[in-house]
Amino acid sequence: MRTVRAVAELRAALAPARRERVAIGLVPTMGALHEGHLALIRRAREQCDLVVVSVFVNPAQFNERSDLERYPRRESDDAALAAAAGAELLFAPPVEEVYPAGFATAVEVIGITDRLEGATRGSGHFRGVTTVVTKLLCMAMPDIAYFGQKDAQQTVVVRRLVQDLNLPVRIEVCPTVREADGLAMSSRNALLDPDQRSRARSLFDALEAARGLAARGERSSEALVDAALQTLGSFGVDPDYVALVDPETLEPLEQLAGRALLAIAARIGDVRLIDNTILEPTPASTSSQKALQGEAIATCNA
């Protein structure tokens, strides 16, 4: 594992692979690597010849100074974990390398960034995300970049960014990796005390409550969201939002008529967590279909 800190170093390290036309994979992270990140690195290792992991705590996407200052940082551990998972390069630039003096450019995706996280954290959050992702993609110029489904809105935004700017990179989204009790793995989980950690599982339980209701035939967005809210309330958790939205446009849905994204954000103490799941309407059971067919036959014979 080699660690580089300057863009020029990164490009020089990648130049031989680019000349040989081998596949380069990039896993962008803010560090404090956990099993979710390692799953992305392993997927990249399966699909690419050379894997780069970036570790950069991006100040531009934090709307609270205290959150930025408390964000866990442990680069030496990250380097060892990334290497064990199959990465060859760790790109860990200082802030001034990413945002040099006089930096005055921002990349912004309009519309889909106004909802969910954008509505709660402010317009600057996703502007910071899209700017740094664009820079990282231009710095490393990977063939494939890997993101986790836990940050569902981010993946939608990044895919739109890549499509709109004609960036020559494929965005690969990998499933959320969870703890044994269902809590989505996050670098912020390390900030939870034991009581908060116990309450944090409420996000997964809330998603499962809505999923169970959908499996029993419920289609009303209001009812599905209410099931999640009641579960959160039973843990004493007041969410920033619980929303059922279209998984591509993030427009709110009134009914579960096809694939839908159920997204949650909540604070557990001072730690803000997000989670989501995909819901789909369950087809009518065979017995229900037979009953409907029987009613139709009876009506025809009447």
Image: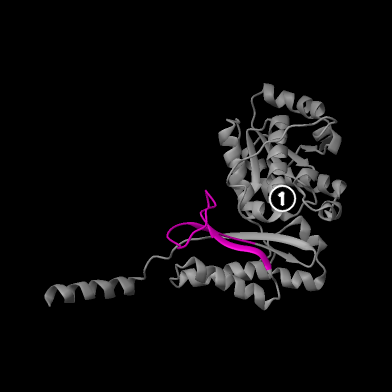
Does residue 102 appear in the picture of this structure?
yes
Residue for point 14% across, 72% down:
300
Quadrant (top left, top right, bottom left, bottom right) of the C terminus: bottom left
> Foreground: 177 or 169?
169
Q: Amino acid at mark 1?
A: His
Q: Residue 2 lies in what quarter of the image?
A: top right
In the picture shown, does residue 6 fall above or below 117? above
Identify the image quadrant of residue 104. Answer: top right
Instruction: Kindly give the residue lying farthest to the top in the view shown.
Output: 19
Q: Report the magenta residues as a range.
A: 239-264
Q: Give how far across and how far down residue 98 sits, in percent.
A: 80, 34
> Foreground: 293 or 77?
293
Q: Is residue 114 left or right of residue 289?
A: right
Based on the displayed image, in which of its 4 quarters is residue 181 positioned?
bottom right
In the visual, does 256 lie left or right of 229?
left
| Residue 301 at x, y percent in the picture | 12, 75
Where is residue 249 shown, x and y percent of the image?
52, 49
Residue that badge 1 annotates: 37
Q: Position of residue 58 (x, y in %)?
A: 78, 44
Residue drawn where x is 80% and y is 45% of the image = 59
Q: Is residue 58 visible?
A: no
